[in-house]
Amino acid sequence: MARTRPGGGPEGHAAEAELARALRTGPFHVALRTALTVRGLALHRVQRRLAQRGVHIGVTSLSYWQQGARRPQRPESLRAVRVLEEVLELPAHALTRLLEPVAPRTGAERPAARSYRSLVEESRALERLLAELESPADGGLHTVCHLERVRIGAGRELRGRDSHHVVRAHRDGVDRYLAIHHGDEGCDPGRVAVRASENCRVGRVRWHTAAGVLVAELLFDTRLRAGDTHVFGYGFDDGTAGPGSEYVRGFSFAGGQYVLQVRFDAAALPARCLRFTRSSAVAPRGGLQELTLTGRHRMVHLVEPSVRPGIVGIAWEWA
């Protein structure tokens, strides 16, 4: 039987490169769908070739697999995937490895999660806001890279923050991101302004005054498919709370790079700055490291190459 492969011209090379990329980054259903397309095989032909090798599986199941609606888990399904690698002329374990627990930094699958309850003391208020905005458990996205810039004003208050965010979708149809702003004590979230600066626009905004928390819906101009990345920018203008002494970022999911910069007004410089981590909102600080404030830019920063569930932040002491 003749093998079905793309031609040797530029289009064929591009298709093979796309397949290699999908097999490298996943997720499973994207890699399977790409392999089927590049090999030019319809599902009924794949089913027939599997049956010739003693594996009997329905076209509907194969369709669900390539759509991401279902995921092979049972032993007979995993055996079928191994035979699929032969049928699609893929390297051994090219597909089966994508069904194993994924290293979070690949951005290919939903990473291990920790509930918001352990990250934010006012978790019930936050959970209600997320439910009101119909947020799924993980939003369909996780972070590839997040650069956050925080501004501390002359009154030692949080003036605002800006984010440059790169995310990857791990399912089809994602078209928004929910950004959370948790102000310092005394924050009036109803007076906090939300800005969409790049590749997004502000949708619904909800807040809880007593908890000092606000959730903003940032809408993309496109619907992402699983594996797609998106770059966007947004920010919050606050200045409604009293003096603060730390800035923290909670992570429900592992993976991705995070960079935090905190810049101080020339009229209010801290005496000391420390980076720290916490396993939850009520856990003690750990991983303490002193940071040097740069004189010219009045700024300190931290870099987390691959975040873990929990909290990371910068604290400062006033003179």
Image (tube, rainbow, N blue to C red):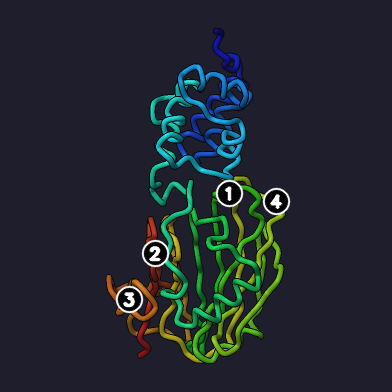
- At numbered mark 4, what does the secondary structure look like: helix, strand or loop? strand
Query: First in sequence: mark 2 or mark 3?
Result: 3
The circle drawn on residue 274 is 3
Q: Position of residue 272 (x, y in %)?
A: 33, 81
Q: Quadrant of the N terminus?
A: top right
Q: Which residue is mark 1?
A: 171
Query: First in sequence: mark 1 or mark 4?
Result: 1
- Relative horizontal placement of residue 86, taking residue 215 as reference (left or right): left
- What residue is at 49 percent from the left and 79 percent from the top? 123
The circle drawn on residue 161 is none
Q: Which residue is mark 4?
A: 222
Query: First in sequence: mark 2 or mark 4?
Result: 4
Question: Are discs 2 and 4 less than 8 Å apart at CB?
Answer: no
- In the picture, residue 94 is in which quadrant? top left
Q: Position of residue 151 (x, y in %)?
A: 52, 77
Query: First in sequence: mark 4 or mark 3?
Result: 4
Labels 1, 4: front one: 1
Q: Amino acid at mark 4?
A: Thr
- Relative horizontal placement of residue 298, taking residue 134 as reference (left or right): left
Closest to the observer, 202 or 319:
202
- At numbered mark 1, what does the secondary structure look like: helix, strand or loop? loop
187 shown above or below 194? below
Labels 4, 3: front one: 4
- What residue is at 47 percent from the left and 72 percent from the top? 116
**Residue at mark 1 to residue at mark 2: CA–CA distance:** 21 Å
